[in-house]
Amino acid sequence: MIRRTLEEMEKDQRNKLIIDVRSPEDHETEHYPGSVNIDIDDFDRLFEERFPEEEREELKKRPIYLICYSGLRSDPKAEEMQGRGYECYSLDEGYRCILRRNVAGYLSSSEEQISDNSDYVKDVERSIVKKFRKDIWCKFTKAINTYDLIQDGDRIAVCISGGKDSMLMAKLFQELHRHGIRNFELVFLVMNPGYNDMNYRVILDNAKKLNIPIEVFKTEIFDSVAQVEDNPCYLCARMRRGYLYSKAKELGCNKIALGHHYDDVIETILMGMLWGGQIQTMMPKLHSTNFEGMELIRPMYLIRERSIIRWRDYNKLYFIQCACRFTESCASCGGTGKGSKRADIKKLIAELSSEDDIIEKNIFRSVENVNLSTVIAYKKDGVKHHFLDEY
């Protein structure tokens, strides 16, 4: 018997070892209490490094439970471990079943807080400008000033997906609007592209809990891309962006704000180089090519993801991680989707940064310090320029 349910694992009162075989980044973001992390992509080497030979022999007397994203990757490893003499099991449905239970518990506890949440909201807002002032609030305002993201008279659609990044962005905008001197208006826009009921309820409950007055509209994007085989994620992203622009313009907005952060930027730079064969970045702001007069801004451009995670955990908040019901990666069904290019890049950057912490900063700086005299060719406004043209 390779698989065991979460209930069976928790009823096992023996001195069990629980191993989270997801990526270190996902384990750091959220994990089962008491679990140790050994990435399944390099499991055997890391297992031997963590447990010397004498300890490995002792582990054969203890039950071992492996937790992956869905159970599919931990199944063969558990079977292999059993063949090597370990009492090893794969958690049925993987981390998704833990997430489902966490979400259900969070929704239940939120009902009490929502009924009288004035003090809680004040604490959350205070944490932004006090405890996380340096790492979040100051970097938010710095990005707005550095990249000139807001002008007087703007009406900004703050686009909320329901994850930690966009929900924090909404609270940051509220604080800016409350204490700032700029004359601008805000609309907190939530698009429901076909969320499952649990994810949708998490978004609505968090909006109430955090006192964010959201404007919700529904689309059928998930159904539209369900049968697409080639690049469904790209198509889904383009469609969602288009719907957000369209709805924002309908509501009288001239800008949409997205919650991409510093780590998204450096990951995009490397992804473009390694898989796109080009040097480009995720811009802090850009004009829409299809919606005249509309602009996209990214005010969380300088905020590190780890700071967002600390803010979330400090305030005991729980957000959906990924709402896509096709990748098995939503808050009610499992993690971040192993095997994506972005997950690979996250892992690569983490490995490089463990050797030298300047690397992340230099990736970000690299697109600010492009020397055209040392570039073979570059494009501007769709026109390619080659160094031989002026050599």
Image (cartoon, grey):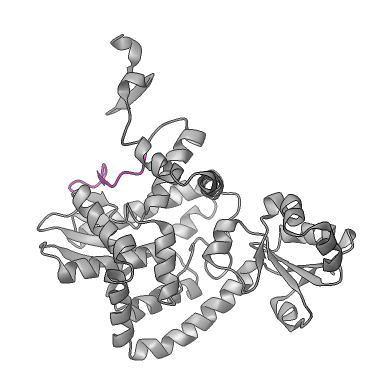
Q: Nearer the viewer, residue 8 or 180?
A: 180
Residue drawn at 36 percent across, 86 percent down: 114
x then y, percent, for residue 241: 35, 52
Query: Does residue 265 show up magenta in the picture?
Result: no
Say if residue 163 shows up in the picture: no
Q: Nearer the viewer, residue 279 or 60?
A: 60
Residue drawn at 16 percent across, 65 percent down: 185
Give, as a single range, the part of the protein colored magenta.
281-293
Residue drawn at 33 percent across, 71 percent down: 131
Horizontal placement of 9 versus 176: left or right?
A: right
Say if residue 222 shows up in the picture: yes
Horizontal placement of 386 versus 154: left or right?
A: right
Quadrant that contains the C terminus: top left
Quadrant that contains the N terminus: bottom right
x then y, percent, for residue 255: 22, 54
Q: Nearer the viewer, residue 280 or 294?
A: 280
Residue drawn at 74 percent across, 56 percent down: 47
Q: Quarter of the image holding residue 334? A: bottom right
Q: Quarter of the image holding residue 83? A: bottom right
Up-down: is 280 above or below 321?
Answer: above
Figure disc tally: 0
Horizontal placement of 71 versus 291: left or right?
A: right
Up-down: is 347 above or below 281?
Answer: below
Up-down: is 194 above or below 103?
Answer: above
